[in-house]
Amino acid sequence: MSLDLRNSNIEKYVLKGNFGLEKESLRVTPDGFLAQTGHPFINNPNIERDFCENQVELITNVSDSIDEMWEELAILQKEAVKTLQDLKTGKELLWPFSNPPYVKGEQDIPIANYQGTHIGKEQYREYLAKKYGKKKMLFSGIHFNFSFSKELMEKGYQQSNISSMKEYKNKLYLKLAKKVTKYSWLIVYLMAASPVMDGSFFHDKDKGKVVLKNLASPRCSKIGYWNDFVPLLEYDTMDDYIKSIEAYVERGQLKEVMELYYPVRLKPIGENSLDNLKKSGVNHIELRMLDLNPLEPVGIRKEDLKFLHFFILYLMFLKDGEFSHFEQMMAIKNEKRAARYEEQSIWIETGWNSTRPVRQAALEVLVSMEKFYKEFKDRKILECIGFQKEKILCPWKRYAVQVKEQFQRDYVKQGVRLAEKYAYELGQ
């Protein structure tokens, strides 16, 4: 079920797609504590809450370009910031970091409040709080959702000998999910932006103490938001994939599919459930390993989003291979390693008893991408890849290095000033 790039009918649809973002941020008071007010965006379905009542989630609609998606995120960010500035209960801010500000304790983290037919959402969050602890839920990030264009799917399906479009899409996205998971370490290494933490995350009494844990992205690291086991999934068919997740639910290791804390999710259109996935098939792939970038007013750089798109396309055309349970364990281990701060301590496993320094491994992937995209004769794509190479060749350009340099002196107070600066700029 390969696609032939030499087919001009295929090539002109490859760079198209459908895009969406979900961006989490904490609401904080001007003194750097978690806001204790109710969710103030009840009339906007694109501004939801995630685990806790004070964790805002900005949800873009489906766009057909990165530019359009990013512009919508900027509009939502501006609307959220303006609403928080004008609250009758007092001004609040959107916290610009993935790591939380001051935390007084577990009692300082109000679980999202749902009523009526949605009460199950609150009960599910109560379950998560007991199992994982509330503090870990405060890590905020960005989820990148992508699906291939309808035209590309139709052309690829016509080239295949698969009996239905649903089966074709399922097979394609299963192959893609394997590859993205395998290389999730590269995304974390290039885009991690959270090296500084407040001591109250670890001990209530350490509020105001700046903590550096040698982590560029705590949420993607060994202390991050993971299941208490490494899920081992089956990728041969969609039935096998679903059954491998169902087995964890039946054994009580997962309550439902949403508890699968994994770098990549395959999602159906509509309700995110295994029954719907089985019935409707895969609609899109979700990448879940992105930190908030505090160096950007909206929390993420457009060039990074464009790179993710090009990276997904590159992986789609790579030769498919086995993704054994050993390789899956290795992929998760690599992502956690890539979340470290010191490059010298990051070694990427590439096979049995085979490791490489992260910079070498990352450069090899990007050079391979450049060779692949030379066929497209699009200078902007190569410039986008070059932007990522600069982070490797010039380590001080890594976001984590810049954030540590700027915010390690007084993390929360400096973070509040940054949030106020962005609120002012977005309000102009």
Image (cartoon, rainbow, N blue to C red):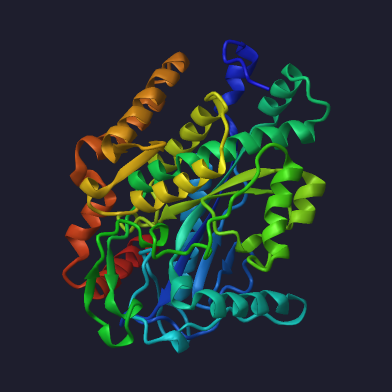
The residue drawn where x is 57% and y is 73% is 41
The residue drawn where x is 33% and y is 61% is 425
The picture places residue 343, in percent across and down from the top left corner, at 23, 47
The picture places residue 202, in percent across and down from the top left corner, at 33, 78
User: Residue 61 versus residue 304: which sits nearer the camera?
Assistant: 304
- Image: 167 above or below 274: above
Please indicate whether residue 309 sits to the left or right of residue 48 in the image: left
User: Residue 155 versus residue 215: which sits nearer the camera?
Assistant: 215
- Image: 307 above or below 233: above
The residue drawn where x is 34% and y is 24% is 367
Please indicate whether residue 69 sits to the left or right of residue 119 in the image: left
The residue drawn where x is 34% and y is 48% is 338
- Image: 232 above or below 208: above
**How many numbered discs sit on the rendered protein?**
0
The picture places residue 32, in percent across and down from the top left corner, at 32, 79
Specify the quadrant that holds the N terminus. Answer: top right
The picture places residue 11, in percent across and down from the top left corner, at 58, 18
- Image: 377 above or below 281: above
